[in-house]
Amino acid sequence: LIRYPDKLKKLAGGKIYRRNSLPGYGSVTVEVTSFRIIFDIDPENLNSRELGSGTRLPEPDAGFSYQQEVFVAASGDLNSSPTSAITSRNTVALDKYWLRSDITQSKAAEEDVLTLTNLSLHSLLGATEWEAGFTETKGQLFTTSKDIFGVGFNTAEQIFLDQELLRGSSLEIFVPTRATVEFFRGARLLSVQVLDYGLQEVDTAAFPQGSYDVDVVMRNGSDIIREETHFFTKSGLLGIRNRPVFFGRLGYNRDELTLGDSLLYEAGVQWRAASLLQLEGSAYGNEDITSLESTATIVYRDYYTDLSWLYTSEGDTGYSATLGGQYRSFSFSASYLETLSGFEVPLLEDAETIEETSKDPLDKVELLSTARNSLRASLSYRTSDFSISLLANENSSEGRPSRSTVGPRATWKVYDDRRTTVELVAEHYDTEDGKKSAGFVKVKHLMDDYAVDGYLSQRQQDSGDEITSQITAMYDGKDFSGRGYRARYSLDARDRETKSDVSISNRLEVDHSARYYDASGYVRDSREGTSGSTSIGINGKSTFLVSEDFYTRFSRPIGGDSAIMVRVTSNTVPTEIAVLVNGQERDRLLSGNESIVPLSPFKTYRVQIRPTENSDLIGYDAKTQFITLFPGNVVGVEFGVNKIFIIIGRLIDESGNPLEWKRVSGLADYSYTEEDGAFQLELSGGEVLRAELGENENCTFQLPEFERPDYFIDFGDVVCAK
């Protein structure tokens, strides 16, 4: 069954200290206390045909369950109204049926906006998922997703998107100076990030799937220093390879709960034709116009490429190509997208002009409202001490200013003793605002959970030279599960040729993750002469869960559609327990508590617990529980642990003769006496102990009264009476 037996030999060969792992292939774990060796092989390395992977999943293990995730984001100056948004995502599940809602309340410039992104009912009938309600279309690479009220379906036996392969189109922006950057989808605030000067790649993990414009607002205090718009797409590679996946949606366009007159439709197919090739095709439009799009994605080892083409019934065309990869110390990526024309569709037949119909957003549907093109390319060479890269990024669209950034960047690590590093950085960019050059000296020093770094830079640009210095102190107190504090304080000073005063900026950023929430925030105070401003920003996330046995829990965001709630009961002082899913450690908790483990739906998982190296001497429930999850399911599983201690002694009969080679029952695990009657038993307290003397013949022995020891106690001779 194993496709790569040589990798298995490498995984299991040599010295194994607790656990060996080989990324992409699996792991082997040695449990000395239970005399077990556990192999966990990545399913990608198994021959699915021989394993018969076409069998259906068993029924879900959850009845009713409920999830509510709350996301809060806000930023702004203390002297003005902040921009804020609160999003509530709710999922109510019952077996193979689930109801989803996604509502955002945002506020900007004294205007409140309520956005209903999703309110839909889903069900799984056979191998087809159906949905109905207020939802949105998938969109295409060249066309935007639209809010609709209608129905849809997807066909697949497993989850449709492999979350590990989930990817989004690259989003890179040029930041003219260190700034607070806000990302909007319409009135909805998606994310707030703090980005340094230069061409920066944006973390889009929090962006929802779909195809849409992202408005980017860069702020320095209360001042907006730059605004731009980027078209963004997010999709994923299929996780199944043995059959194509079909999808379709049909519904009326909407503005929140108000329906329009245009009936939108989309239909398509995705097929993972081979491990390295995925093909996609789709049709999208309304009664007046249709957009046809095809895409081929090739992933081979460290190389990938995407090729897409668009044609509409109005004769509009577009194409896109992406190529990237890595060869030894070189890495490269390039993408180009161009639409030769856009289209707008008036839906009211008696309208005299498009301008008349465009007063109400429901009077027309813009699938591709403007012509646009974008080019992005990068080439880099990297060694342990030196890297050089050439970056190019250009975006232009009809009716909007063109944005471009081209230039090299080089980094040289001149000193590194693992605790202290010194780097020299040089970069030069040609932008639409002129030439910008900069040189940096960076120093960083590590001290266990702390780090201090600083830099001195000089920038030359058409608007005037600038000298900047910054010192930063950081603390990282998060554990392996991501819980704890992380803090960062920075102080920077800027002397600009165009300004008479030096600007001073203080910034404090704090990130805290606990059992019940994830939260981050910043406070920034900027002063220049007699003027200044103070700005703040916060991001917070929490989840409320109700499992199928109506056990409730607040938790950090689970980051998935389903989860298991592991509860560990205990009759002793708390001790550390590891939670294992499919043989992999997913969390640690103290006995007597519970842990939330987010998992992808449409799969069956093996759930176990085991003591950690920090555990006390305990007995634990070693059974394996198999859990099948569907979207929205929150399944509770329970394990027990108990304090154990060791007793030693010699078992004798009523005449004083040793009872040799006798099996002792009444324990969690059986034990035998030795040739002189000596025994060693693990007890948790309260057991009735018997020795098997022969067929249908036993004797019982009572231990003298004793105080419960921490580890072991010697009783000497113990009489076993018939």
Image: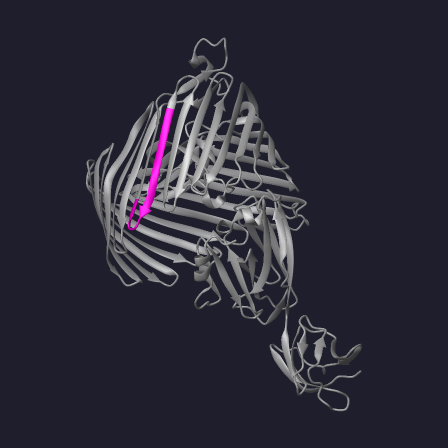
Along the viewing direction, whichever of 400 and 98 lies nearer the viewer = 98
Please provide percent x and percent y for residue 425: 23, 49
Magenta stretch, overall SS: strand
Residue 326 lies within the magenta run: yes
Left or right position of 647 against 698: left
Residue 183 lies within the magenta run: no
Number of numbered discs on residues: 0
Left or right position of 367 against 95: left
Left or right position of 317 against 39: left
Tell me which residue sits at (56%, 39%) in the image.
Answer: 89
Please provide percent x and percent y for residue 550: 68, 49
Left or right position of 703 against 496: right
Q: Which residues are magenta?
A: 318-331
Q: Is residue 465 above or below residue 115?
A: below
Q: Is residue 109 visible?
A: no
Q: Is residue 583 visible?
A: yes
Along the viewing direction, whichever of 492 and 351 lies nearer the viewer = 351
Tell me which residue sits at (47%, 63%) in the image.
Answer: 12
Q: Quadrant of the C terminus?
A: bottom right
Please provide percent x and percent y for residue 147: 52, 27
Q: Quadrant of residue 74?
A: top left
